[in-house]
Image (cartoon, rainbow, N blue to C red):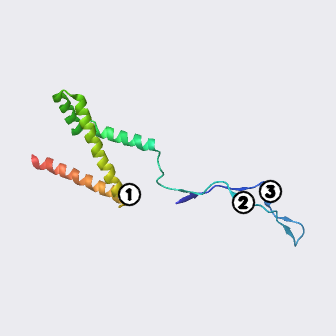
């Protein structure tokens, strides 16, 4: 962990005035100086807090791109075409997506409070690998 500290400010005294000035060989005159911190010491964390706008934009872009052309969107498209009530289908599908997103956020918050980020990332990677292997297994055994 790297600590960034602000330089010390010397109230009203220049740097050259702080030096030792010998009057004679046995006497040193020290000019007093009071060192005051200019700013707080801040730890440089590897995970900096992101602004709400950055988090929102990243989340929106990720989910938007992931949802384009998936089975949920295709199902919504078909329901809208069949029902001839596109706004009712929109409201129903939006409510469903909001509810599933809420469940994901609540579950994610619960997991984050109990497991480290590395554990969650490794677990997600293993789960995606297992799902991929199951899909490949299904493809190879169905032919």
Q: Nearer the viewer, residue 134 or 123?
A: 123
Q: CA distance from mark 1 to mark 3?
A: 50 Å
Residue located at (82% from left, 65% from top): 30
Residue annotated with mark 2: 35
Q: Residue furthest left?
A: 143
Q: Residues within 10 Å of mark 2 (few under 14, many from 20)?
A: few
Q: Residue furthest right?
A: 24
Where residue 75 sits in the image (x, y, percent)?
19, 36
- Label annotation for residue 82: none
Q: Nearer the viewer, residue 95 or 126?
A: 95
Where residue 22 sits in the image (x, y, percent)?
86, 66
Where residue 83 sits in the image (x, y, percent)?
17, 29
Q: Secondary structure at mark 2?
A: strand
Residue annotated with mark 1: 117
Q: CA distance from mark 2 to mark 3?
A: 14 Å
Of mark 1 and mark 3, the one earlier in the sequence is 3
Q: Is residue 69 visible?
A: no
Above or below, 24 relative to 13: below
Of mark 2 and mark 1, the one earlier in the sequence is 2
Q: Secondary structure at mark 3?
A: helix
Residue located at (31% from left, 53% from top): 107
Q: CA distance from mark 2 to mark 1?
A: 41 Å
Above or below, 56 relative to 40: above
Above or below, 136 relative to 43: above
- Label annotation for residue 16: 3
Left or right for 47, reference 34:
left
Q: How many marks?
A: 3
Q: Residues within 10 Å of mark 1 (few under 14, many from 20)?
A: few
Q: Secondary structure at mark 1?
A: helix
Residue located at (77% from left, 61% from top): 33
Q: Nearer the viewer, mark 1 or mark 3?
A: 1
């Amino acid at each position: 962990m790297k600590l960034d500290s602000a330089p010390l400010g010397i109230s009203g005294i220049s740097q050259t005035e702080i030096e030792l000035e010998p009057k004679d060989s046995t006497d040193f005159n020290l000019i007093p100086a009071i060192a005051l911190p200019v700013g707080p010491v801040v730890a440089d964390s590897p995970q900096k807090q992101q602004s709400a706008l950055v988090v929102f934009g990243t989340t929106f872009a990720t989910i938007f791109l992931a949802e384009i052309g998936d089975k949920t969107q295709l199902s919504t498209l078909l329901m809208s075409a069949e029902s001839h009530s596109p706004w009712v289908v929109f409201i129903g599908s939006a409510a469903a997506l909001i509810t599933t997103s809420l469940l994901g956020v609540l579950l994610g918050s619960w997991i984050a409070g109990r497991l480290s980020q590395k554990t969650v990332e490794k677990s997600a990677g293993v789960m995606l690998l297992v799902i991929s292997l199951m899909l490949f297994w299904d493809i190879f055994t169905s032919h």
